Amino acid sequence: MSLTLSFIRRSSAAGALALAALAAAAPLAAHAQARNGAAASDCRNCGTVEAVNPVQRAGRANGIAGTPVTPGMAIGGVVGGILGNQVGSGNGRTAATVVGAAGGAYAGHAIENSQNRYTAYVMHIRMNDGTRRTVEQRTALPRGAKVIVRGHTAHLR
């Protein structure tokens, strides 16, 4: 009989300890779940990516020493001026040199811009409040991804 009482006491102690642990953990889990649920529904900058469209954009070339003159313009202008100087004589040669320099600068700038092209991604995002935002950035996020929009960029949640 004392063996049975001892077993019941041990079982009761273990059961009470387990019950106390569950009682302490339950409010914490309920609070965390309520907080996460509230954060997801109250997030004004959160949404879901509905569509992703790649687009080609021309990159901007940096000017030389802080000026708007790019290396492509400078090289193209020099080459165009040299080639223009080979044509004609007198005032015709001067005019050809100027036209060659201007044409060369334009061509050099166009070539440089075509070399600096990159792919951007236009993403249409349905926000949690039902509105729709469009974000363009260099990294694509998958369609259906849950995102948060900060400024002009979207990040995975």
Image (cartoon, rainbow, N blue to C red):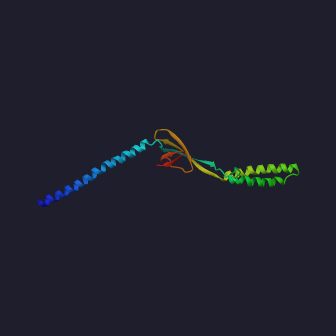
- Give x and y (percent) for residue 29: 33, 49
Q: Quadrant of residue 9?
A: bottom left
- Give x and y (percent) for residue 23: 27, 50
At x 25%, y 54%, the residue is 18
| Location of the N terminus (image quadrant) | bottom left
At x 75%, y 53%, the residue is 76
- Give x and y (percent) for residue 100: 79, 51
Is residue 3 rendered to the left or right of residue 63? left
- Give x and y (percent) for residue 140: 54, 50
The reply to whether residue 144 is in sight is no
Is residue 54 rendered to the left or right of residue 85? left
Q: Residue furthest left?
A: 1
Q: Residue furthest top?
A: 130
Q: Residue furthest right?
A: 90
Q: Quadrant of residue 15?
A: bottom left
At x 78%, y 51%, the residue is 101
Work out whether 154 lies above or below 11. above
The reply to whether residue 25 is in sight is yes
Please state which of residues 86 and 23 is positioned toward the viewer in this rendering. Answer: 23
At x 83%, y 53%, the residue is 85
Is residue 122 rendered to the left or right of residue 5? right
